[in-house]
Image: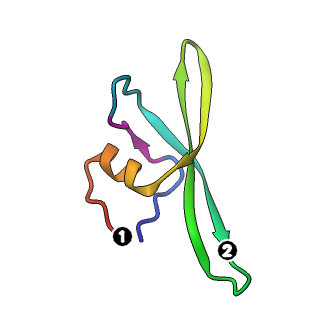
Amino acid sequence: MNHYPIGTKFTPIGKHATECTVTDMLTTRNLAGEIVSIRYVATHIFMGQTVTNRDIAAATIARGIGGEVQP
């Protein structure tokens, strides 16, 4: 599983593509302590305001930086 460091810049694919920056990584663990899921927090600037998205998948970042998506 890919882990992207804080500060990684990517451009998500879509109609209004703006450069985003990874600001945090959120992990979910089960009772056994195993990591179940990893999500990223990313920010971008929209009309002078900082917009934060707290549900970015690793595949979105991989597509945005041109890398390969790995399971």
Q: Is residue 10 magenta?
A: yes
Amino acid type for the residue under numbered disc 1 = Pro
Which residue is under mark 2?
A: 29
Q: Which residues are magenta?
A: 8-13
Q: How many marks?
A: 2
- Residue 8 versus residue 48 in the image, above or below: below
Compared to residue 66, the image places residue 17 above or below, namely: above
Task: Please state the horizontal and vertical placement of residue 35, each as a whole percent of the image.
Answer: 60, 76
Residue pointed to by mark 1: 71
Name the residue: 40% across, 49% down: 61
Contact, mark 1 vs mark 2 (Cβ under 8 Å): no
Q: Earlier in the sequence, mark 1 or mark 2?
A: 2
Q: Secondary structure at mark 1?
A: loop
Q: Quadrant of residue 69?
A: bottom left
Q: Would residue 9 be counted in the magenta stretch?
A: yes
The residues tagged by marks 1 and 2 sit, at their Cα atoms, a distance apart of 18 Å
Q: Amino acid at mark 2?
A: Arg
